[in-house]
Amino acid sequence: MGRVTPNEDGEMWDYIRWAGASKKAFNGKPGQAVLKEIEKALLAMPTQRLIQDKWVYADDVCVLGALDVYRTTQEKNISWGTARHIIIQEGFDTEDWDIAKKD
């Protein structure tokens, strides 16, 4: 979901729709499940330091990068550092990853 802000043309409807959809998504059952998983991912980080503008870089990750590394550690039963290294090597394909997993 991209970020939308009100623009100078006064077109607020895109922002209003985005804000409503975001609130509905976060308050729903799948949204709450993802937020709980993000919390687990952030607590599992060896160094609790987040970056912006990159998914995974060196020892740092963004919030969704942390979730990706955490899920990789759970799926493959490997350490955080190994999972982070795998993600750096393989890159990230948005078509293969659904943030609200349905398992």
Image (spheres, rainbow, N blue to C red):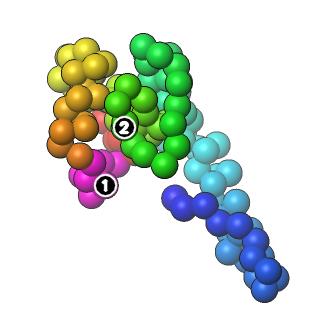
Task: Inspect the image, locate mark 1, and give the three-letter code of the amino acid beneath it.
Answer: Thr
Left or right? Give the position of 73 relative to 14: left
Q: Position of residue 57 (x, y in %)?
A: 37, 36
Measured along the vertical axis of the image, is residue 55 above or below residue 80? below
Q: Neighbour class for label 1 at 10 Å: few (<14), some, many (≥20)?
A: few
Name the residue at the bottom extreme.
Answer: 9
Indicate the secondary structure of the residue bearing disc 1.
Answer: helix
| Chain part drawn in magenta | 92-98
Q: Quadrant of the C terminus?
A: top left
Q: Quadrant of residue 18?
A: bottom right
- Upstream in sequence: badge 2 or badge 1: 2
Indicate the secondary structure of the residue bearing disc 2.
Answer: strand
Check disc 2 and report the residue beneath it: 56
Q: Quadrant of residue 3?
A: bottom right
Q: Which mark is residue 94?
A: 1
Residue 25 on the magenta segment: no
Please say whether residue 7 is visible from this viewpoint. yes
Q: Neighbour class for label 2 at 10 Å: few (<14), some, many (≥20)?
A: many
Left or right? Give the position of 15 relative to 25: right
Q: Position of residue 19 (x, y in %)?
A: 70, 60
Task: Inspect the image, locate mark 2, and give the three-letter code of the amino acid beneath it.
Answer: Val
Please say whether residue 20 is visible from this viewpoint. no
Measured along the vertical axis of the image, is residue 76 above or below residue 86? above
Residue found 52% across the figure and 59% down from its top: 1
Measured along the vertical axis of the image, is residue 22 above or below residue 63? below
Q: Position of residue 10 (x, y in %)?
A: 82, 82
